[in-house]
Image: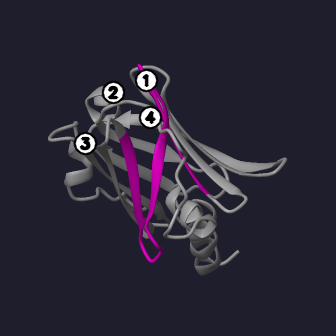
């Protein structure tokens, strides 16, 4: 498999959550009649920097989330493969009408806004429904160092999606120059 083919595969298969979400739903989602109640102030557990590695293609996925402030939480996601960025995404969770919305803007794709389904101590879940397809995204902090993001597409009895495992990393590493491994002779 060529490097270019791996890059394209990574962009299609591992674009952390949002590219897949945007491909499944249009920009005008139909929201549930009664969203769950909650506030971004309950999401302190998500703040920080997280990194996952794809078993499928070896790509590295980084997410960085700010602490909740002023009724919103901002995040950014980057996916790297073979030393190149293959996709990026802007993310924002914000308070609206006693609930929380999740806005995703992946690079090169239409934005999507999801509605809160569930919020608990270390869990937050969102969904959006358009036509017969419901897209669900769930974050769950398993412990101090592990986070799982679950993406599901539901259409009738059909269910498909992916789980993304993340480990907490030192955010300073995301702001320092990349250190290259010395080449072996």
Residues under numbered marks 3 and 2 in contact, where contact means CB atoms less than 8 Å apart: no
The residue at the point 46 percent across, 73 percent down is 110
Most extreme residue toward the right, as rendered? 157
Residue numbers of the magenta segment = 100-129
**In the picture, residue 180 is in which quadrant?**
bottom left
Few, some or many residues within 10 Å of mark 2 (<14, 14–19, 20+): some
Q: CA distance from mark 2 to mark 1?
A: 6 Å
Q: Label 2: which residue?
A: 45
The front one of 116 and 14 is 116
- The kind of secondary structure element at disc 2 is helix
Q: CA distance from mark 1 to mark 4?
A: 15 Å
Query: Which sits earlier in the primary sequence, circle 3 or circle 1?
Result: 1
Q: CA distance from mark 3 to mark 1?
A: 20 Å
Point out which mark residue 171 bears. 3
Say whether residue 185 is visible: no
Residue 34, given in percent of the width and then of the height, sits at: 50, 38
- The kind of secondary structure element at disc 3 is loop
Nearer the observer, disc 3 or disc 1?
1
- The kind of secondary structure element at disc 4 is strand
Point out which mark residue 159 bears. none
Q: Label 4: which residue?
A: 167
Residues under numbered marks 2 and 1 in contact, where contact means CB atoms less than 8 Å apart: yes
Q: Is residue 108 magenta?
A: yes
The front one of 35 and 12 is 35
Residue 97, given in percent of the width and then of the height, sits at: 31, 41
Say whether residue 9 is visible: yes
Few, some or many residues within 10 Å of mark 3 (<14, 14–19, 20+): some
């Amino acid at each position: 498999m060529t490097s270019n083919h791996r890059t394209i595969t990574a962009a299609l298969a591992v674009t952390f959550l949002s590219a897949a979400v945007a491909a499944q739903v249009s920009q005008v989602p139909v929201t549930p009649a009664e969203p769950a109640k909650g506030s971004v102030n309950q999401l302190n557990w998500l703040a920080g920097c997280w990194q996952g590695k794809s078993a499928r293609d070896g790509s590295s996925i980084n997410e960085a989330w700010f602490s909740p402030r002023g009724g919103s939480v901002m995040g950014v996601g980057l996916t790297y493969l073979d030393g190149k960025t293959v996709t990026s995404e802007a993310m924002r969770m914000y308070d609206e009408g006693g609930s929380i919305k999740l806005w995703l803007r992946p690079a090169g794709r239409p934005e999507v806004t999801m509605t809160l389904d569930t919020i608990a101590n270390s869990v937050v879940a969102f969904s959006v429904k358009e036509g017969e397809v419901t897209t669900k995204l769930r974050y769950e902090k398993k412990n101090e160092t592990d986070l799982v993001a679950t993406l599901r597409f539901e259409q009738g009895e059909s269910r498909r999606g992916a789980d993304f495992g993340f480990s907490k990393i030192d955010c300073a590493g995301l702001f320092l120059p990349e250190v290259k491994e010395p080449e072996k002779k």
